[in-house]
Image (cartoon, coloured by chain):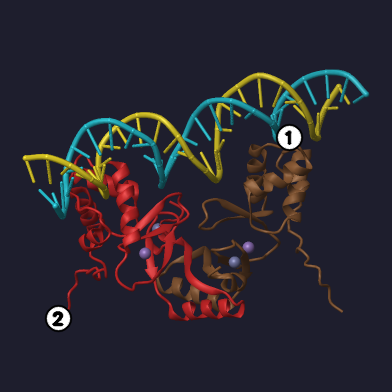
Chain colours: A red, B brown, C cyan, D yellow
Amino acid sequence: MTCNIIMQKPANINLSEYLSAKGLRSTSQRDAILKLFMAAGRHLSAEELHERVRKAHTGISYATVYRTLKLLSEAGLAKENRFDDGFTRYEYNSADDHHDHLICTRCGEISEFENDKIEALQLDVAKKKGFKVRNHKLEIYGLCSKCQRKQGE
Amino acid sequence: MTCNIIMQKPANINLSEYLSAKGLRSTSQRDAILKLFMAAGRHLSAEELHERVRKAHTGISYATVYRTLKLLSEAGLAKENRFDDGFTRYEYNSADDHHDHLICTRCGEISEFENDKIEALQLDVAKKKGFKVRNHKLEIYGLCSKCQRKQGE
DNA sequence: GATGATATTGCAAGTCATTTGCAACAAGCA
DNA sequence: TGCTTGTTGCAAATGACTTGCAATATCATC
Ligand SMILES: [Mn+2]
Ligand SMILES: [Mn+2]
Ligand SMILES: [Zn+2]
Ligand SMILES: [Zn+2]
């Protein structure tokens, strides 16, 4: 018997601990934003997250969403992605997760993949150039299967 | 006996032909910008190009550099790159050239590579998901060999 | 070579996502 | 409860890039 609910792997960071360790404060806004950020699917823009946040907790400002998203990124709870659509998208950063993205340019769907061979080949390439890799970004743009069918509509 | 001078492969497009085919006009600004764009190393921002252009031909505006860069991209003579440093960088687009980038986050050096295995594996990944690839972007960020030596300075 | 329709330019002003100054406010320790 | 200092909402600022517009230049036509 398996669990069909998609579970988010827990992050290796706890927000309240991070905050108090840094002399920062827990606020209802931060709690609300983190909660909705985790509950939401991945790859939200600040605007999309703000929209969800304001529905549940009126009065939370745009600026606070931005500031909190930056905080979460610094804390390691969020990861920033700049795809080719003009704004930054954030995704929940579960522990030790690395993946790259397939992005549908028609409907915006973003799917994820991991490929150890590609990762290894990247290191080979870098090694040949004496380059020390810190991070990388692989984005594949095109049409998802649904949108291929819809082509020509 | 080999040629040590790095030669730019010729583009498959000629600007004046492109312009007249589209009912557009050749101007001294466009000529100057293209000339300096090609002469310069790769991956220039609009600002960097404008700086070079204004040194040689006073009076050419920022807006014209931007407009010309967009024109060159549409003509297939330039390629836009959005790395993680906040602005668009353009590179001369020689015929049938595809490559990916290694970017030094300390000095900004950008080097290029091609790796057929990685390209093939990307297609495999996409195929498994029923995804039709249109283009992709692989950027490896880290430290170039020079900057590794300078670390700690 | 002069003419005229229209593309192009420089400038200033406008976009748009994101950031920031600031005064009102709230967390958390004493 | 009081007080220090971090946090918020709002509006204004940023900064890369774009655009409206009047002046100017190109080029097909005469
Ligand atoms: Mn992702
Ligand atoms: Mn390149
Ligand atoms: Zn799609
Ligand atoms: Zn370097």
Residue A148 image point, x, y percent: 43, 60
Compared with residue B115, is residue B49 higher up or lower down, i.e. above or below?
A: above
Query: What secondary structure is found at the residue carrying circle 1?
Result: loop
Does residue A66 appear anywhere in the picture? yes
Side (left or right) of A9 relative to B149 = left
Q: To which residue does mark 1 refer?
A: B59
Question: Between residues B137 and D27, which one lies in front from this camera angle?
Answer: B137
Q: To which residue does mark 2 refer?
A: A1
Q: Residue at x 55, y 79 (%)?
A: B117
Residue D28 image point, x, y percent: 81, 33
Residue A95 image point, x, y percent: 30, 71
Query: What secondary structure is found at the residue carrying circle 2?
Result: loop
Q: Quadrant of the N terminus of chain B?
A: bottom right
Q: Residue at x 41, y 62 (%)?
A: A144
Q: Amino acid at mark 2?
A: Met
Residue A94 image point, x, y percent: 29, 68
Ligand 4 position by quadrant: bottom right
3D distance between C-alphas at marks 1 and 2:
73 Å
